[in-house]
Image (cartoon, rainbow, N blue to C red):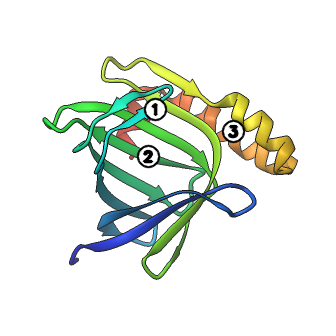
Amino acid sequence: MPHHRITINSLSYDLSIRKSWECELTRSTSELIEAVGVFDRNIEHKELGLIEIGTRSVETFFFDRWFNHFHFFRPDGSLRNHYFNICMPPRLNGSILSYVDLDIDVVVWPDRSVSVLDLEDFDRNEIELGYPPEIRGAAFKTLNGLLEVGIDRIISTV
């Protein structure tokens, strides 16, 4: 499959764009989209720290799962971290892949320690954006499922 650029849109529940970036599409099946992006500038993230320019992100978006997976590699090629977004399954429209980000993130560090981020953002946005009970249920079912299967199984399934 020839590689080409795609745009990834991370949306709020009200469908406004939170973040948008371009990646190189590397794999597309009826089950998932995989793409690779490279950070073109340094990003200071409140929980992840400095993400250096040149960091490579291998991104997997599953059409039937309520999470996506980002596998970050430092510019020298070493593992930086795994990052899981709890989100609604994505939609692909031409060369634009969009997903609704449900705030909660799971980070797996190289030492296999796990951090769950942004639970307070979920609680705030649940009220502000009007998440229905089924969205809350799906988000926490997904979070608990990721945490219960164990880190090695999580990573091996993506």
Q: Are marks 1 and 2 in contact (CB under 8 Å)?
A: no
126 up-or-down from 91: above or below: above
Residue at which label 3 appears: 141
**Badge 1 element:** strand
Which residue: 44% across, 37% down? Answer: 83
Task: Point out residue 24 in the picture as x, y percentages from the top left corner.
Answer: 28, 65
Task: Point out residue 137 in the picture as x, y percentages from the top left corner.
Answer: 78, 42
* Quarter holding residue 98: bottom right
Residue at which label 2 appears: 69
Disc number lying in front (1 or 2):
1
Residue at which label 1 appears: 45
Quote the CA–CA distance across marks 2 and 3: 17 Å
**Badge 3 element:** helix
The mark that comes first in sequence, 1 or 2, is 1
Where the N terminus falls, by quadrant?
A: bottom left
**Badge 2 element:** strand
